[in-house]
Amino acid sequence: MIIDERMSAFIDSLDSGNPAWLNEIEKFALETQVPIIRRSMQSLLKFLLKFTKPKSILEVGTAIGFSALLMSEYAPEDCHITTIEKYEKRIPIAKENFRKAGREDRITLLEGDATEILRELEGTYDVIFMDAAKGQYIHFLPDILRLLPPGGLLISDNVLQDGDIIESRFAVTRRNRTIHARMREYLYELKHHPELETVILPVGDGVTLSTKKEESTVTQNK
Ligand SMILES: C[S@@+](CC[C@H](N)C(=O)[O-])C[C@H]1O[C@@H](n2cnc3c(N)ncnc32)[C@H](O)[C@@H]1O
């Protein structure tokens, strides 16, 4: 927890909540140790979707479909969501959740490793939500930048590694060192890339919001 637990609980308690069917999927995920977005991230996503009104969303990391369904609930009705998942055990559960919610026509699940799938995708997505293996974000970035239009929004979750990100690499466990180095590189890239404007927020486990600059602004700032 990177912010005070009581403060986080207080802020969450003010949220108006989600429909009962979404609460059930959230409960199932928590009971079966499926990692899903926290309440604070849910709240931020709801706000961003109401504000940006995207027509297309790309999610990397479906798990059992909780965040995709949450986004389908708060994005405009004509918004299409494409979501990528590689873990075979989670894919059928996600599909069943999409079917039960009657959202199969609004959500497309692409099965397989995002490293390969992202390379094959064409066109652009108004919003891209990155919520997969943290150590891979930096490798996904070139494709993500290609798939994000000027004015598009890239949201990346879990970027502050439970607070470990500020520690020296020797202070984090050996197991987490590669992720630590790659996440620092990712954050540096997001903040210094000439095509992006990025803010890092201590929400949940840390979130970045990046927008791709309009082409004229990129040239001016060079
Ligand atoms: C944190 S969970 C996603 C949670 C989901 N967004 C939600 O909040 O409901 C991350 C998911 O990304 C998947 N994942 C990790 N690396 C991936 C990759 N390279 N390609 C596709 N899926 C990946 C994992 O299997 C896991 O189910």
Image (spheres, rainbow, N blue to C red):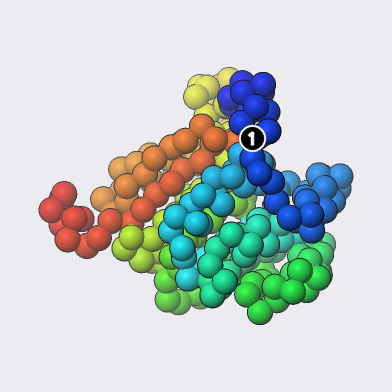
14 to 78, vertically: above or below: above
Residue at 44% over, 55% down: 51
Side of 207 relative to 10 (left or right): left
State whether residue 31 appears in this view. yes
The x, y position of residue 94, in whole percent, is 76, 65
- For badge 1, the amino acid type reads Leu
State whether residue 68 appears in this view. no
Residue at 42% over, 71% down: 124
Extreme-left residue of the structure: 220
Q: How many marks?
A: 1
176 to 171, vertically: above or below: below
Side of 109 relative to 77 (left or right): right
Side of 62 relative to 215 (left or right): right
33 to 62, vertically: above or below: above
For this rendering, which residue is in front, 121 or 45? 45
| Res. 219 image quadrant | bottom left
Extreme-bottom residue of the structure: 105
| Res. 65 image quadrant | bottom right
Residue at 17% over, 61% down: 216
- Residue on which the image places disc 1: 14
